[in-house]
């Protein structure tokens, strides 16, 4: 027991040390970093057709993502937050990254600094004019901590597609008592809901995404991944059954996929350069949501099957055997043989007493309509009698009408 406790403590300590070291590495990267303000101008210069910097990689500050190339940056598949970070903050890029060249520039005059290709092997940043002297800054992209979708406004139309009718659960109804006519049972089934948020390409996949309805966080998922929700629901199955019968049933659902577009405010949350607090970026986006869910469930019943084994067998009178001389001579002093109990097989048992509604299926509706009509006429007649009585009393009190003296 002591060894297990010691081992668990060691694992927790190593995990804490690893998390602390990762946080310190990110903080170390951000020291003396400078934000790239003119991102569009930078992309137009790097992504030109005659540029020699198209195959240069872009360093990522997150350990969860691989290095990105400038070609991906030109396709707007990254965030707009780019930082120039001293190359010394990364340590040995030949061991850290998988790429051989990164985009760099000199720390000299910012307005006239020339972009160069930093080679991780030679640790030199070169251009067409030669090697750039002095301290070198390497371009890196900063991933957001999380996204927030707020103030969603959906379009009026929804494109719905019926996917099919999956089988959700199986069950069995049994009527073992002759006094029961209706048997019911609650059946639990698993309802799945899948949600996909189709966001613009500027949203980085793999980052945490929170969807808000007002000030309440309704969904918490990962950008670019499907959100799964599972919960148990219950449906009641009730059926008229003859005594000593069993019936199999199946719960069937209707699965529908809804596609609906919306516009919302996208809040991109970053950490600041020191790793404390938050810095936010707000933008308007047009996106869509794809929701796959069950819209309706029902129960399908099979044909009833008899349960005669669960019923006590009926006692059949003994079949008398005619005594013969041979039997009397051979079985003297022995009791007479017992009669054979006949047990019916594969014979359906019906209830003799039928309800009126079962004998005449439409009688119930007719009876209900007649009762409503009868009581409506009776109510109108009573109201007319009450009205006439009140009018006569008023005329008698005021001496008007037939009660007048003139």
Image: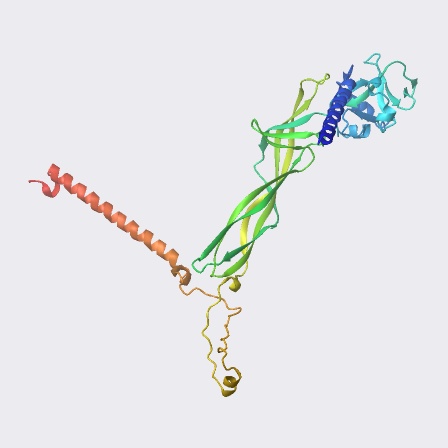
Which residue is most to the top? 109
- Quadrant where the N terminus sits is top right
Which residue is most to the left? 406
In the image, taking residue 337 as reference, residue 140 lies left or right, namely right
- Quadrant where the C terminus sits is top left
In the image, taking residue 119 as reference, residue 41 lies left or right, namely left
In the image, taking residue 312 as reference, residue 278 lies left or right, namely right
On the image, the x and y values in percent for residue 185 come to 50, 51
- Residue 270 is at least partly visible in this image: yes
Which residue is at a point 46% across and 70% down the rendered structure image?
A: 315
Q: Is residue 195 above or below residue 110?
A: below
Which residue is most to the bottom? 325
On the image, the x and y values in percent for residue 327 come to 51, 84
On the image, the x and y values in percent for residue 202 come to 71, 29
In the image, taking residue 31 as reference, residue 186 lies left or right, namely left
Colour convention: rainbow
Q: Could you say which is closer to the camera, residue 352 or residue 336?
A: 336
Q: Is residue 237 above or below residue 118?
A: below
On the image, the x and y values in percent for residue 174 come to 51, 57
Q: Is residue 5 above or below residue 233?
A: above
Q: Quadrant of residue 70?
A: top right
Q: Could you say which is closer to the camera, residue 28 or residue 224?
A: 28
Which residue is at a point 77% across and 22% down the rendered structure image?
A: 21
Q: Quadrant of residue 364?
A: bottom left
- Residue 306 is at least partly visible in this image: no
């Amino acid at each position: 027991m002591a060894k297990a406790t010691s081992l668990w403590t060691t694992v927790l300590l190593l995990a804490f040390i690893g998390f602390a070291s990762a946080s310190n590495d990110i903080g170390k990267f951000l020291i003396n970093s400078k934000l790239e303000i003119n991102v569009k101008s930078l992309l137009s210069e790097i992504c030109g057709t005659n540029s020699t910097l198209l195959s240069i990689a872009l360093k990522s500050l997150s350990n969860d993502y691989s290095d990105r190339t400038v070609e991906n940056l030109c396709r707007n598949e990254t965030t707009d937050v780019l930082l120039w970070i001293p190359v010394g903050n990364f340590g040995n890029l030949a061991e850290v990254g998988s790429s051989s060249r990164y985009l760099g520039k000199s720390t000299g005059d910012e307005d006239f600094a020339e972009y160069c290709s930093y080679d991780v092997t030679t640790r030199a940043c070169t251009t067409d004019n030669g090697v750039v002297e002095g301290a070198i800054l390497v371009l890196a992209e900063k991933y957001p901590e999380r996204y927030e979708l707020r103030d969603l406004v959906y379009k009026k139309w929804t494109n719905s597609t019926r996917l099919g009718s999956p089988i959700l659960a199986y069950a069995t109804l049994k009527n073992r008592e002759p006094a029961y006519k209706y048997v019911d049972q609650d059946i639990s089934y698993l309802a799945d809901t899948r949600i996909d948020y189709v966001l613009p390409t500027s949203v980085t996949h793999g980052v945490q995404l929170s969807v808000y309805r007002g000030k309440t966080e309704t969904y918490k998922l990962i950008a670019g991944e499907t959100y799964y929700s599972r919960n148990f629901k219950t449906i009641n199955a009730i059926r008229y059954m003859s005594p000593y019968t069993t019936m199999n049933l199946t719960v069937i659902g209707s699965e529908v996929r809804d596609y609906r577009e919306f516009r919302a405010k996208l809040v991109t949350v970053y950490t600041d350069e020191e790793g404390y607090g938050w810095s936010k970026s707000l933008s308007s986006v047009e996106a869509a949501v794809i929701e796959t869910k069950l819209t309706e469930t029902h129960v399908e019943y099979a044909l009833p099957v008899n349960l005669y084994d669960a019923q006590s067998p009926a006692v059949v009178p003994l079949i008398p055997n005619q005594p013969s001389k041979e039997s009397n001579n051979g079985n003297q002093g022995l009791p007479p043989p017992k009669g054979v109990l006949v047990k019916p097989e594969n014979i359906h048992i019906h209830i003799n007493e039928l309800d009126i509604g079962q004998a005449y299926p439409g009688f119930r509706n007719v009876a209900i309509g007649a009762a409503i009509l009868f009581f409506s006429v009776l109510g109108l007649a009573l109201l007319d009698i009450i009205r006439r009585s009140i009018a006569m009393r008023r005329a008698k009190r005021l001496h008007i009408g037939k009660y007048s003296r003139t």
